[in-house]
Amino acid sequence: MLLTKVTSATCVALYAELEKLGRSPSTRRKAHATLSAAFSDAVPRLIATNPLAGVPKRIKPKYKPADAEPYTAEEIRTFIRTVAGTRYAALYAVALFPQLCESEIFALERSEISDDRSVIFVRESKTEAGIRRV
């Protein structure tokens, strides 16, 4: 198909076809981002307008987080037993704290963990709360 023949309807049909083929929302969003960048670069040298400009927001692929099932206590115990003695055992154990995000875990320093290892003080955080106790 010639670039000049692509319309908003063509893009909507592409999104519908990708969904029909079972492509993930992530794949569909990446396709949209690639098309959007390509069409933006093509305006005004190759095409008069960006065909994606006419695609309604409700049609554009959206992120839908997958439903996550929390680990059971037994699954956590099994995991901890499995990684015990490995180089990253402590990191894995801390990562199981649902209150901590990835950036907080990787920013932790030894001094931020209490001597009895019952409390972690988060000093590097995405939140504006400053130091918080977990």
Image: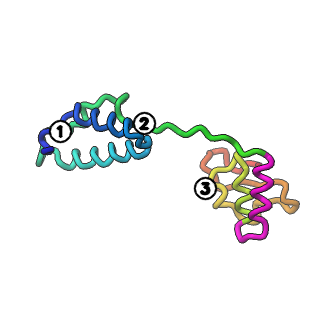
Marks 1 and 2, how far apart in space?
A: 22 Å
Residues 132 and 103: in front is: 103
Secondary-structure class at tag 2: loop
Residue 6 bears which disc, if any? 1
Secondary-structure class at tag 1: loop
Marks 3 and 2, how far apart in space?
A: 25 Å
Residue 55 bears which disc, if any? none
Q: Determine if the magenta segment contains residue 116.
A: no
Q: Mark 3 points at which residue?
A: 103
* Marks 3 and 2 close (CB-CB < 8 Å): no
* Marks 3 and 1 close (CB-CB < 8 Å): no
Residue 3, x across and y down, in percent: 15, 44
Q: Residue 50 vs residue 24: left or right?
A: left
What type is the residue that disc 1 sits on?
Val
Q: Specify few, some or many for label 1: CA neighbours under 10 Å numbering under 14, 14-19, or 20 or more.
A: some
Residue range highlighted in magenta = 73-88
Secondary-structure class at tag 3: helix
In which image quadrant can residue 39 be found? top left
Q: Residue 119 vs residue 24: left or right?
A: right
Magenta stretch prevailing secondary structure: helix
Residue 81, x across and y down, in percent: 80, 61
Q: Specify few, some or many for label 2: CA neighbours under 10 Å numbering under 14, 14-19, or 20 or more.
A: few
Marks 3 and 1, the one that precedes in the sequence: 1
Residues 126 and 57: in front is: 57
For residue 78, above or below residue 12: below
Residue 10, x across and y down, in percent: 22, 35
Q: Name the residue under label 2.
A: 62
Q: Determine if the magenta segment contains residue 78.
A: yes
